[in-house]
Image: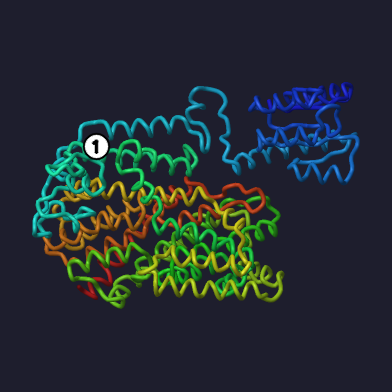
Amino acid sequence: MPKLLLVDDEDKFRKSLARRLRLRGYEIIDLDDGEDAIKVARNDPEIEVVILDLKMPGLPGDQVLKEIKAFRPAVQVIMLTGHGSVESAMETGRLDAYAYLEKPCNFGKLVDTIESARTAKIHAMATHEIPHPARGSFWSWLKGSHNNRPGVIIIGFLLFALIAFTPPPQRMLELLSAEKIETASSDLVAGYAGYAEMKAGESISDYYGHKYGVGGKSKDTSSQWRYRALSPEQGSFRAKVMLGTLLAAALFWATGAIPIGVTALMVGVLMYFFGVLRPDDVAKAYAKDAVIFIFGVLAVSQAVTKTGLDRRIGLLLLGPVKSLGHLLFFFLPVFGIACSFISEHALVAFMMPLFMMVYASSIRAAGVEQDRALAVMFALSLCFVGNSGGPGSPAAGGRNAVMLGILADYDMAPSFGQWVMYGLPFVPVMGLVAGAYFFLVFRKKLLVKELNVSSVVRQAAERIGPMNSKEYRTAAALVVLVIMWITVSDRFGMGGPVILWLVALNMLRILSWRDITAIPWDVVFLYASAAALGKGIAVTGAGLYLADAFVGALPPFLQSGEGLAIATSLFTGIATNFMSDGATVSAIGPITVPMATISGTPPLMIALATAFASSFAHALIIGTPNNAIAYALAKDPITGEQLVTLSDFLKHGSIMLVLSLLVLWFWVFFGYWRFIGF
């Protein structure tokens, strides 16, 4: 039965009300003292709603409310008093009371308020990331609820232990102990992330131990302290730790076993305590430019929304969108093309607040409290098409720059125009395929039947009147930011310009420090941990081992030509969902180019197949900033409840990954590439 706590110093009233509520099926704890109420509410997790008298001897009701909320922020408190006033209502409202009712209160109204408060408690638990306690059998406890799934946690750590503490595969030992030779095209370790810095005759274990100082120190013949090399067994243990960490973290992120920010911290904990990197290097792995960029873009989104500039941008981009079909079959392909030339991360960050505004207006007009299907369709379609813009040009993301650098090492780097010729035709076709998928899957699930995005955006823009000086200043700074991203990101990275932008907006009195700190930090930590995962997998040689194992398992017909391109893109497309796209290209790219040379396949074909597939990070939010940004901003505008879950990404993202690969294979590899040639 639902458990309520009733606190009132009037014995006759309290006992009578408790009896009537029990007849309605509630379990009641009734108390006449505020201090006792605080103790009970703090220690009984099954209490859903507190009915609290405002005026009591001893500790007053408003103080009891404040104390209860400090310990149990999700518990809903209904203030019930015979001494009502506007001032007391305002005070309890300030202290986050759910409702304020005067005695005597209509009993039916009180029951309705209790039931709505119970619903609000579920939303509040989601907002505060409080696990919903599982009741019943041992199986129910194991299954748990979002952010608290004991069974999955146990499985995750068992898998980690199974990978980390079992003997290393012989092939891993061979790769980590093989010495670098002069001819890269036939070198066994040519795919290692640090290959260019390795000396001839040096193995991965030697280089890794010296470079990152994880082998300990010893004095040489001249009594100087030097870092020792790792043995292949020591190096393989650290590689297996990273593989186990990757599997456990991916499992936790995909299932919501623990909060995503805690999983992000867990990655660092395992890297610290199993000696994958020294403490300073673990911290550096978390503090990549891409992480600063994610933080900055989320703050940029705050500024754009705060000034109302998102409505102007939306009116410009979404003006022609007057139906669901226009959104999916016109806007999405155009948006994908835009993401090929302008940072897709920034465009997703600018558009998501606007889409959530359209969501709020649409459900209000339709008379429904929530339409999760609409929110999921908005967020995921925008996110996946933004990801799919990656192949369009070298400017679409850091992963493309990484591949250009790899090709440059072999004197095979294409020009900007050549890349566009090979990649841009993929983008609008994939946009149409994505639109068709979301149309077929979601159109019957939507509670909002009439969707006129143009009208909603236009009304929102008209509601705030003409552009003011803050909007003009924000818009000017935004134009400068985009120009800097396009022109100087190779020198200052993507994070430098956005940090400059935040400082400038603060000096212009547009964005306060409170606005900046209000961003969802768990998402920032999540992407930081993805960067750290990629670093650890690359430097330990775990990434090379994964790539080598995949290539070794290929049948002969997939070892050259389009077959090798298919195999490479398949492996890259899967891997990019588990670590950042840039880290994926860094780990896999160096081995695919020499593979192509050996097999007689044009290296540019295999390199582009690798780079293109690294854009298909749809299934997990750690693969690309787009996913992290969309997830962070997809919250109910009223309750703050997370509308798009990690399971939504896994379910629809996995299907979109398959569709992306099919379009890549049949439209690109066996389609126009055969006519263009290499």
The correct choice, above or below, for 353 with respect to 315 in the image is above
Side of 472 where 223 appears, left or right:
left
**Which of the pair 656/260 is nearer the observer?**
260
The answer to whether one can see residue 553 in this image is no
For label 1, the residue is: 237
Seen at 57% across and 26% down, the residue is: 135
Quarter of the image where one finds residue 400: bottom left
Image coordinates for residue 88, horizontal then vertical, percent: 85, 42
Give the amino acid type for the residue marked by disc 1 in the picture.
Answer: Phe
Q: Residues within 10 Å of mark 1 (few under 14, many from 20)?
A: many
- The C terminus lies in quadrant: bottom left
Side of 420 where 88 appears, left or right:
right
Quarter of the image where one finds residue 416: bottom left
The correct choice, above or below, for 404 with respect to 91 in the image is below
Image coordinates for residue 128, horizontal then vertical, percent: 60, 41
Image coordinates for residue 477, horizontal then vertical, percent: 54, 73
Which residue is the extreme one toward the front? 222
The answer to whether one can see residue 461 in this image is yes
Seen at 11% across and 49% down, the residue is: 179
Seen at 57% across and 48% down, the residue is: 642
**Which of the pair 31/179 is nearer the observer?**
179
The correct choice, above or below, for 58 with respect to 636 in the image is above
The correct choice, above or below, for 99 with respect to 357 in the image is above
Seen at 16% across and 61% down, the residue is: 596
**Which of the pair 602/241 is nearer the observer?**
241
**Which of the pair 263/598 is nearer the observer?**
263
- The N terminus lies in quadrant: top right
Secondary-structure class at tag 1? helix
Image coordinates for residue 32, horizontal then vertical, percent: 82, 23
